[in-house]
Image: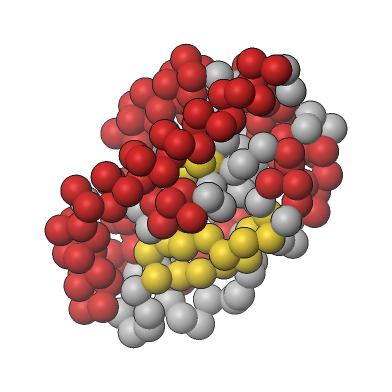
Amino acid sequence: MTKHQLIYTKVKRALDFILSLCACIILSPILIVLCIAIKIDSRGPVLFKQKRVGIHKTYFSIYKFRTMRIDTPKDMPTHMLKDPDQYITKVGRFLRRSSLDELPQLFNILKGDMSFVGPRPALWNQDDLVAERDKYGANDVIPGLTGWAQINGRDELEIPVKAALDGEYVRKMGFWFDTRCILGTFTSVLKADGVVEGGTGEMKKK
C-alpha cells in the first residue's frame, strides 16, 4: 500500500463513520418497514448474523436482514446449497434482488468492521477465496458493502476472477476509484446485475 493510500484509509474511515451515521438516521423509516415485513412473512429473527473474515483475516459478525427460512443449513454459501430457491422467503427474494438485505451492514460500517467500499467479506469457511485473496493483499484492507468485484460480475464470478478483481481494487484504492465503485453499484442494483442464486461461476458457464 502506498503512502497516499495509507493517508486515504484514515480519511476513508472518517467518511465511513459520518456517512453511515447519517444513512442510519435518514433510512430509519425504511428499516422499520422492512423489519415489519420480514416478521409478517416468516418465522424467525429480523436480523441475520454470520461470521465473516475482516481485515488481516480477523473475524467479525456481519448483519443482514434475514432472507431465508430458519431451517436453512448454517454457514453454507448460497452457491453450495442444492436448491437455494427453496429456502428463500417471499420478502427475502425481493430484498436479495434489490440488495436491501445489505442495509443493516450500515451498523458494521459504523462500528468499523466494514467500509462502504472494499472486497466483500468472505465467510469464515471460504478458505479458497481467502487463499486467493492472499495472493493480492486483498485480505489486508477493510472489507466493504460494495466493491470492484461487485460491479463486475458479483455472484457470476468464479473465485479466482473475484479475487483478482479485489486485488485490482487494492492497487487502485483511492477516493475517485471508490466513487467509481459506488456509482457503479447503483447501476448494478437497479439492473440486478450478477444476482444469481447459487450462481458462483455462472459467467464462465455462459
Above or below, 97 against 35 in this view is above
Above or below, 168 against 197 in this view is above
Residue 147 visible in the displayed image: no
Residue 38: quarter of image? bottom left
Q: Position of residue 55 (x, y in %)?
A: 69, 46
**Residue drawn at (19%, 48%), measured in percent from left and top?**
26
Above or below, 151 against 19 in this view is above
Q: Position of residue 135 (x, y in %)?
A: 84, 32
**Residue drawn at (68%, 54%), measured in percent from left and top?**
53
- Colour pattern: secondary structure
The one nearer the camera, 156 or 116, is 116
**Residue drawn at (33%, 30%), measured in percent from left and top?**
186
Residue 45 visible in the displayed image: yes
Figure quadrant of the N terminus: top right
**Residue drawn at (78%, 32%), measured in percent from left and top?**
137
Number of marks present in the image shown: 0
Left or right of 160 on screen, residue 188: left
Left or right of 29 on screen, residue 113: right
Q: Position of residue 62 (x, y in %)?
A: 53, 60
Q: Position of residue 189 (x, y in %)?
A: 35, 36
Left or right of 139 on screen, residue 72: left
Figure quadrant of the C terminus: top right
Above or below, 194 against 23 in this view is above
